[in-house]
Image: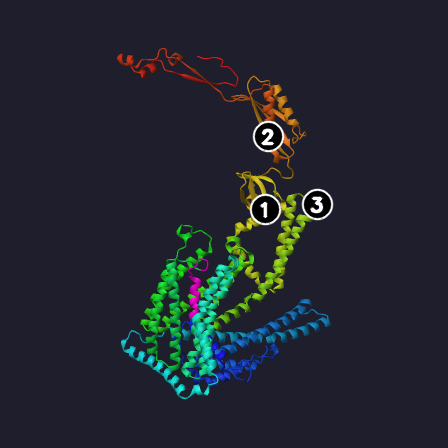
Amino acid sequence: MTAAARWLRAAGLAALLALAPGGLAAQEDGSAAETAAESAEEIGQAATGRGGAVEDSSPDPAPRAETVDFDAWNESAERIEKTLADGQASTSLLERIRGDLVAYRERFSILQNEQNARVQTLQAQLDALGPAPEEGQEEAADIAERRAALSRQLEEARAPVLTAEEAYTRADGLIREIDGRIRARAAERLFSQGPTPLNPALWPTAVEELLRSFRAFVVETEGEFADGALSTDRESLPIAVVLILLGLLLLARGRHWAERGVRWLRNTISRRASGVWRFAASLGMIVLPLIGIILISYGLRLTGLIGARGELILESLPVWVGILVYVRWLAQQSFSSDDDEATLPLENARRTEARVYFSGLSVLVVLGAILNVFTEADDYSSDVVAVLSFPIIAVASLLLFRLGMIFRGAAPEAEAQGEEDDPDPVLFWFRVARLLGRILIVTAFAAPIFAAAGYLQVALALTFPMIATLVLAGTLLVLLRVIADVYHLVTGRTARESNSLVPVFAGFLLMLCAFPVLALIWGARVSDLTELWTAFTTGFQLGESRISPADFLYFIAVFLIGFAITRGLQGGLRSSVLPKTRIDIGGRNAIVAGIGYIGIFTAAIVAFTAAGIDLSSIALVAGALSVGIGFGLQNIVSNFVSGIILLIERPISQGDWIAVGDNMGFVKDISVRSTRIETFDRFDVIVPNSDLVSGTVTNYTRGNTLGRLIVPIRVAYGSDTRKVQRILLSIARAHPLVLMNPAPYVWFKGFAESGIEFEIRVILTDILEIFEVQTEMNHQIAERFSEEDIQIPFPQRDLWLRNAEALTGQGVPDHRAFAAEGQTPQSMEDKGPLSKSVRSSTGGGDPDGGE
């Protein structure tokens, strides 16, 4: 095995260590695997359909459907069922069997797809011949012969499909059974109770075993040195020394060089491009130390002083250092002292604490990995593993608790000032951080309790996946910031300034891709994810048709094409064809809307047909749903039908002046559910279409814009009524918007309380100009009445007083005299009270009497 291969394998082991819920000391009993090795090889050979070993990684080309050997499959399936019935197969063996079953299931799916097309073609040919004749009826000889031949071919084509369906179902059932058994074992192992690490009797043994591992490592190295490894590799020794020194230099100074590069870019490059380039330069904090540790590992191997345990450590050493430098870099990016770089801008003191706690968690992860290597090399007992793991879990829980307290207290300035409805996405991430903080606190309390009670696997399944979740969340935040920086670099505007959805969609896709990683972190198997993907790609059964995502995407593509064609046709009719006709604007809108409905309905039908969805197979489902729709959506359906009626009958059209109830205005839009009316106050009123169909609607401009205007006038008593009528009639006839047929008319309405009333009644050619016409007529009436000395009356009151001398100072009652005579002013008022009478008179008139 080459060094690169060993490093890759170590990287895979470390990734599994960080993501798997078992984390430390997740060992599998291999006794069952050893006892069933022979049967495993036989089952693997039968399931793959070839005599080679299961470990052969070179895949065969995808076989055609007719090459599937169903007899071999049945034999393999029987062996697999017997193995599952015995219950002795190890988890690794079950995983291998499952992989073989997945390969077979894929072949059966290919067979169904290939043969279904042939079956559909033959069935279409039979349908083209028409229905078979009933008993007693004869059919043409050539047609009967052709029908019989097609029927035989159809039966022959259906036979492999039915066989493949049965085999597919059997393989799928076996896969589900294996998955259930593996999950049951994982759950049993997870909740198995072991020794408590708080037992002092176990501590000396654990310390002794750990010291024994270190001594064994030192003894191996001394043995290699004593055997003259250096003398045998003298040619490689200078290279090894150079590599080790260069690696030490990169490990010691690489991060510092990268930080200097970031600071230089911050001060040199423009703000528009600085975000992207600073991120690229900051990656040197990871890459340079990682290259250094790789050079050190390779140099140490060249010396020949590394024993078996040293090889295990060197294989994992680049990964361990990679974890340390990456988490430290991630903490620097997430909790940077620079507000522009920090993905979660907390207080400066809190940021420093968070960086320290993150770095401490990475050290604990590496310590757990080292313990796992020693456990594998020296075969530690469960007692030793429990005792050595407990300090790691306890310290990790303490750091998680402190991080939880920091996240829980996170509060941005906008929210602190009460602006909780601010759409700033930073507020959303602060809320997520507070929720994550509460989860961290609960985990920090639960993990040590489980570990102390002997449930080590539960404690590990809480602690290390939670650390991995924090790393994943931090990585997502950094990538989201990078996406925003790239958008700023390309467009020249920040995402907040442009209010663009491009960074939002990119972030959504990024988070969607993170869900499988999160599932793996919390214990999901890769096979679980592949099974979900298989179920997604296979689709679901709808009636007699199977709908897959590919069919769904095809349906969407065809429907969008039909929708685009419909919109294009509507636009052409609206702008080019209909304006050249004599159809009014309401009729044009009705035609355009009707074509839109028909086009969308046709596009949906064509899309269903193109996607291979049999509408007749879902007719029963649609009929059942129609009952619920009739009750639950009756108002919506009623409004929709009313909208169709409005478009067909056109009692109102776009642009009409209507009155519905207390609302009056112009019709701006008629949709399938409602009609939008713009009132004279310039606000919109949304009226359900059913109200327009079933209610009373006044349409002032239906068919034409003719309408009547009534202008009321009042003149003072004493005016010449004939003269007033002639003046008003001349004003009405002179206006250009007044129709002469029917001729304008002036109505002498009668005698009112304060004046003589007249009305001008005219028909306007455009009722929409009613306010302008009335305003102009009022101006002309005021001007003509002023010229002809005709007064416009206004309410007037005359006040007549009795004993007016009391107001002039004569005969004013003396209160002292009243008091001397034993009288009061009230008694005098009773004898001679003041009284008043009120009378109405016309403007300009004189009072005609009094008392």
Q: In the image, is residue 612 above or below residue 211?
A: above
**Mark 1, residue position:** 670
Furthest-bottom residue in this view:
227
In magenta stretch: residue 333: yes
Q: Which residues are magenta?
A: 324-341
* Residue 772 figure quarter: top right
**Mark 2, residue position:** 774
- Give the class, few, some or many, for how many residues have Cα within 10 Å of label 2's Cα (few <14, many ≥20): some
Q: In the image, is residue 69 above or below residue 488?
A: below
- Considering only order in the chain, which callout, 3 or 2, is on the residue closer to the N terminus? 3
Tell me the colour scheme of the image.
rainbow
Give the label, 2 or 1, closer to the camera: 2
Real-space Cα separation, disc 2 to disc 3, in angstroms: 34 Å
Tell me which secondary structure the magenta stretch mostly adopts. helix
Task: Indicate the secondary structure of the residue bearing disc 2.
Answer: helix
- Looking at the rendered structure, the kind of residue marked 2 is Gln
Q: What residue lies at 48% left-to-right and 67% top-to-bottom? A: 283
Residue 597 location, x and y as percent? 62, 53
**Mark 3, residue position:** 581
Please state which of residues 474 and 349 is positioned toward the viewer in this rendering: 349
